[in-house]
Amino acid sequence: MPDRAAVIAALDAVIDPRSGQGLMAAGLVQGLVVADDRAGFALEVPAGDTALYAPVRDAAEAALKAIPGMARVSVVLTAEAVATPPRRRTAGLSPQAVDQGRAKAPVPTDRPAHVRRVLAVASGKGGVGKSTVSVNLACALAARGLRVGLLDADVYGPSAPTMLGISGKPAYEDGAMVPHEAWGLKAMSVGLLMKADDAMIWRGPMASQAITQMLTQTRWGTEDEPLDVLVVDLPPGTGDVQLTLIQKTPLDGAVIVSTPQEVALADARRAKTLFDRVNVPTLGLIENMSGDVFGRGGAEAEAARLGVDFLGDLPLDAALREGADAGVPVVAGDPDGDIAGRFSGLAEALSKKLDLQGFQTQL
Ligand SMILES: Nc1ncnc2c1ncn2[C@@H]1O[C@H](COP(=O)(O)OP(=O)(O)OP(=O)(O)O)[C@@H](O)[C@H]1O
Ligand SMILES: [Mg+2]
């Protein structure tokens, strides 16, 4: 099995064109993970230098692949944002430590260009329908005449490629990634950048590097046609990965998806606490899979306890799952149906909360 020393030596044999040093010595290698027969890292280069470093990334990838026993290599090229305040490394810190850090300095975030609002969709618990809600909510916002993007940041289980029926690495143009277009949305997914087996590597610091890159180096909009709202499907849970992500992502608000059961609601509470900690407003709670099996109304009562708005419920409905599996979001496939109507209500409430009504000009 390749060891870390071999990986470091290989990377230091690749020369940084700016400093003339090896990549490790030049400090360009971030979040290096070496695990069994895989390695991955983010090559973090100065703002505006991504074109210069694209061949360097390729050379680093080739150098690692040449190590005997190395089966998979993942190198993500990321550029520092222009004039970013000094970075704070927060992964692994306790929430208290993060809070203390926060009091001293504002958390640096990299705001994507030409994006008016960034909305996170979160859940404390996995499998509650966060991705289903993200995708259909994005479609419902688009149906209101907004320019909408979807960023699938779920490093544990990216689902936008399946749910939207998109595949293939995004094209690079003038140093920016070109998002896929599907169902009236601009879409990017960690699933388009990583191979299924790389998930383990991606959960480390590399995940947040890659997501920052997808956020800030994707051509979501232009000066003439800015994106009105970017919906971000976050990984489920309330651990360090999520904390780092929401600290690095300039979120204007979050919605939390929960099923009606108490276990899911307890996790929804934790998600709310996480957003409070980083001063991101929780815009509301959505109950999914509401109905006979799991009961109904738990999320509404929980929202009242938490002092957040209850935005609405979505029934357990086979069409939602079938649409997701087929790559046709129900809101797009059956725009006049009951489910689309419910998402339309959610989209209306959220566009008010995000102050987006003025931008509904395309219809
Ligand atoms: N209201 C619903 N009715 C029926 N099926 C649903 C509903 N919501 C979600 N599903 C199905 O439940 C499964 C989990 O949903 P989804 O992938 O959206 O959840 P998630 O919270 O994003 O999960 P993960 O934690 O794995 O990312 C999927 O098969 C989806 O199609
Ligand atoms: Mg999901």
Image: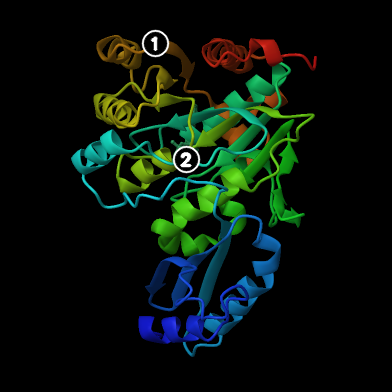
Q: Looking at this view, is 303 or 18 the one in front?
A: 18
Q: Amino acid at mark 1?
A: Asp
Residue 318 appears in which quarter of the rendering?
top right
Dot 1, crowdedness within 10 Å: few (<14), some or many (≥20)?
some
Q: Amino acid at mark 2?
A: Thr
Q: Taking 124 as reference, is 353 above or below it? A: above
Q: Which residue is mark 1?
A: 309
Q: Taking 52 as reference, is 145 above or below it? A: above
Residue 21 place in picture, x, y as percent = 52, 80
The C terminus is located in which quarter?
A: top right
Question: Residue at 60% of width from left, 45% of height from top?
Answer: 216
For disc 1, does the CB lie below 8 Å from ligand 1? no
Secondary structure beneath dot 1 equals: loop
Q: CA distance from mark 1 to mark 2?
A: 27 Å
The N terminus is located in which quarter?
A: bottom left
Dot 2, crowdedness within 10 Å: few (<14), some or many (≥20)?
some
User: What is the number of the mark on residue 109?
Assistant: 2
Q: Earlier in the sequence, mark 1 or mark 2?
A: 2
Q: Is residue 319 visible?
A: no
Q: Taking 285 as reference, is 249 above or below it? A: below
Numbered disc total: 2
Q: Is residue 117 left or right of residue 103?
A: right
Q: Looking at this view, is 65 or 288 the one in front?
A: 65
Residue 80 place in picture, x, y as percent = 54, 54
Secondary structure beneath dot 2 equals: loop
Q: Looking at this view, is 361 or 65 the one in front?
A: 361
Q: Is residue 141 left or right of residue 94?
A: right
